[in-house]
Image (tube, helix red, strand yellow):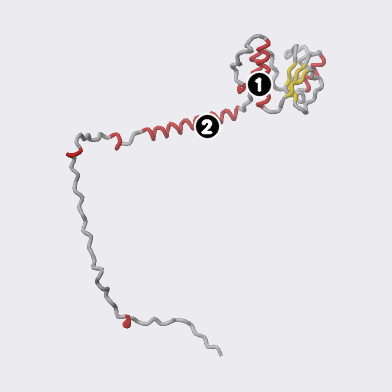
Amino acid sequence: AVLEFAAATGVTPSAGCFTPGNFFNQQAAFREPCLLLVTDPRADHQPLTEATYVKLPTIALGHTDSPLRYVVIIIPCINKGAHSVGLMWWMLAREVLRMSGTISHEHPWEVMPDLYFYRDPEEIEKEEQAAAERAVTKEEFQGEWTAPAPEFTATQPEFTDWRRLQVPPVPIQQVPTEDCNAQPGTEDWSAAPTAQATGTTSVWS
């Protein structure tokens, strides 16, 4: 978000670890800014402290628990969330460009706030790989389902007069019939052997 703000407004960014002495030591990384804008007063306490040595005005994005020492102007917001911080930097960039006359107040800014949101490079790479895999799978399924079946592509005969079409006769199967009045055959039940019980008996005295 800080780099996008710097690219839009033309200011000098200082993202990452701050090197002590950049505001008053004559060295290669020496800077003499006119205004210091920080995201978190608690994490950026070193540049805020050094800004007092050179009487540098400071502006900070502060939450309810942010320290206000050495801060001239505080902008209340949630400075812990990636989306909140990105949106605040986007709004600041838009207001700076409007105050400088670069963009008009009547027309919305063409730059979307999504460009100011921080995204992990590993997550971006995973999303790109997943999108590529979905595209390959979609092409494979489209190739399978878009190919026409041979029975639908074969040339079908055209009939102009359906009355002349001859339908082959269907043979009728003869089903054997039985006499319902006939009495079923009787068997001699007396000739059947009598089943004997095979149980174990005990004698109780």
Q: Earlier in the sequence, mark 1 or mark 2?
A: 1
For the residues labelled 1 and 2, the Cα–Cα distance comes to 26 Å
Under tag 2, what secondary structure?
Answer: helix
- Residue at 52 percent of width and 32 percent of height: 130
Picture quarter containing residue 181? Answer: bottom left
Under tag 1, what secondary structure?
Answer: loop
Q: Which mark is residue 44?
A: none
- Depth order, front residue of 95/163: 163
Left or right side of 119 for 171: left
Q: Is residue 13 above or below residue 169?
A: above
Residue at the outermost top position:
101
Residue to which mark 1 is pinned: 1
Q: Residues within 10 Å of mark 2 (few under 14, many from 20)?
A: few
Picture quarter containing residue 70? Answer: top right
Residue to which mark 2 is pinned: 130
Instruction: Indicate the amino acid at tag 1.
Output: Ala
